[in-house]
Image (spheres, rainbow, N blue to C red):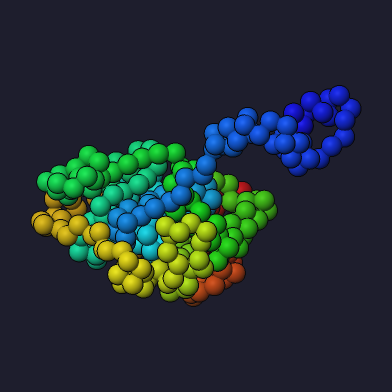
Amino acid sequence: MYTKCIQHGIRIRKEDVRILLSLLDPVASQLRRTRRLSRRQYFAQGPNFVWHIDSYDKLKPYGICLNGCIDGFSRKVMWLRAARTNSDPKVIGGYFVETLERCGGCPRLVRTDMGTENVVVRDIQRYLRRDDVDDRAAERSYVTGASTANQRIESWWGVMRKQGIEPWITAVGELKDEGFFSGDFVDKALSQFCFMSIIQELLNDIQGVWNAHRIRPSKNPNVPSGIPDVMYMAPHLWGAENCLVPLTEDLTACKHSCTFLSSVPCDVDLFDLCTIIMEESSLEFPSTMSDAVDLYIQLRDTVRPQLFGPI
């Protein structure tokens, strides 16, 4: 109706149109109001009821691939890892199994995107829940959906970016703009060699600070507020219960389907070459982002001529 008024040259506010329609035709106005789309409210019964898993790809073009998992009830970050890939399902499965061992059980439900990188997690979750009898047992213990609908972890990526990843995105972007990053295998391996350990330390700090900070109250009455670590460990204070499903068997069989990260962050041959160059040049491993960028440029100027000849 507002658009029709504008088309006929009548200048009026949308609010005035709404008020007039409610006065002239209150029955139809009420009918439209009852059919209005209502936003669904998030709900988790307690810690370990649902884990949300997702990957973050802003640094992936530079060889740094992030993956994380967050508990739906407490918003506790269960893992936050940087590696050479977040597309290999065996690597993501390794994160999952390590966390299951640390927790002593599995969540009642796992929520991921529909990508193939999550198939090992899917198989392990369904395998561990195959004999349970609750309404989320076996096949129903794992659900997928659009990435944008995986709201718990998707919204948290913005927090991570603000807490320290943004400068790294800017720094590696500048390296590319200035011609110091071509995107080939060597440059990605050098990026992993120089940046991976520092970024992982940053992620550990972000995870620790987040899990110990206080989340403000939400408009959604089903979502508790408080400190993630406390909400995870003492859900009874919020009238909830721990939904962890205890492990009833050893995880050895599951581990055979997984790949666990080693201490070498990049290609082994290039790692050995860079280590030798650093020893010969008396270079030290960096502890800051600026030092890491300087090391990357020095190693690149040395490694590429050795591999491809003088430019």
- Residue 222 lies left or right of residue 124; in this view the side is right
On screen, 169 above or below 120? below
Where does the image place residue 300, in percent across and percent down from the top left? Answer: 55, 57
State which quarter of the image contains the N terminus.
top right
Where does the image place residue 162, in percent across and percent down from the top left? Answer: 58, 63
Residue at image location 45% in from the left, 62% down from the top: 196
Relative depth, front residue between 74 and 114: 74
* Residue 60 in sight: no
On screen, 90 above or below 35? below
Among the 4 quarters of the image, the one containing residue 197:
bottom left
Where does the image place residue 198, in percent across and percent down from the top left? Answer: 47, 68
* Residue 44 in sight: yes
Residue at image location 51% in from the left, 54% down from the top: 155
Relative depth, front residue between 180 and 154: 154
Residue at image location 61% in from the left, 48% down from the top: 311
Relative depth, front residue between 123 and 172: 123
Residue at image location 17% in from the left, 60% down from the top: 246
Among the 4 quarters of the image, the one containing residue 36:
top right
Where does the image place residue 86, in percent across and percent down from the top left? Answer: 40, 48
- Residue 220 lies left or right of residue 13; in this view the side is left
Q: Count numbered badges in the picture.
A: 0
